[in-house]
Amino acid sequence: MLTWLLIIFIVALAIAPILQMVPSKKQRRLARLREYAVTHGLFVEYRPLPGKDRQNLYRSEVLFYGKRIPDSGEFMRQVWEREEQDWQREAPPAKQELLRALPDSVRVVVAEPGGVGLYWDESGEEEEIDAILAFLGDVGGAKLVAKA
């Protein structure tokens, strides 16, 4: 009997590291979301958060989802941050309306030469990525970059 217990213990000890390499449910969900975004034309990156939220540099819960757009050469970087439940008041009213169409889990939007993107906490599902795609698509991205 003691021999069998020792064999079971040794086998369990050998299998434990292998079981730890199996992705968790959360890791599988995040990989699925990121793959969905990439296959629909976005790029996903770890980037430091701009602006006031600097203490959260490279927080693993907030990733940059972006879309590349042609660089007109006459555009400077712009950043809009979510302040509590609404976007910062410095944004023009037309851009405020665009920003309000985003899911509540989006914290910062950045428009820069060559692309437009946002920092999202990945708390939603594919439906939120669809809303982000619609926002970053030709209409949202072009309107954000347009002078107003």
Image (spheres, rainbow, N blue to C red):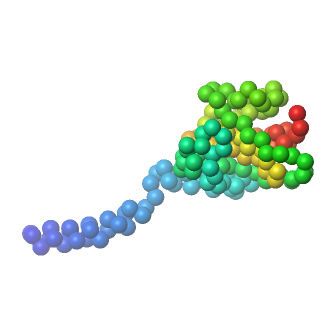
Give the answer, above or below, for where 67 lies relative to 82. Answer: below
Residue appearing at x 63%, y 26% in the figure: 85
Instruction: Using residue 113 as the reference point, say whether residue 54 is left or right of it.
Output: left
Instruction: Using residue 112 as the reference point, say whether residue 73 is left or right of it.
Output: right
Location of residue 3 in the rendering, given as x and y in whole percent from the top left corner: 12, 73
Residue 48 shows in this picture: yes
Q: Identify the image quadrant of the C terminus.
A: top right
Q: How many marks?
A: 0
Q: Identify the image quadrant of the N terminus.
A: bottom left
Location of residue 41 in the rendering, given as x and y in whole percent from the top left corner: 74, 54
- Depth check, front residue: 130 or 148: 148
Location of residue 124 in the rendering, given as x and y in whole percent from the top left corner: 58, 40
Location of residue 2 in the rendering, given as x and y in whole percent from the top left corner: 9, 70
Give the answer, above or below, for where 18 lies relative to 127. Answer: below
Residue 134 in which image quadrant:
top right
- Depth check, front residue: 129 or 115: 115
Instruction: Using residue 49 as the reference point, say whether residue 17 is left or right of it.
Output: left
Residue appearing at x 81%, y 26% in the figure: 93
Instruction: Using residue 84 as the reference point, say whether residue 140 is left or right of it.
Output: right
Residue 122 shows in this picture: no
Residue appearing at x 83%, y 45% in the figure: 76
Residue appearing at x 60%, y 43% in the figure: 54
Residue 83 in which image quadrant:
top right
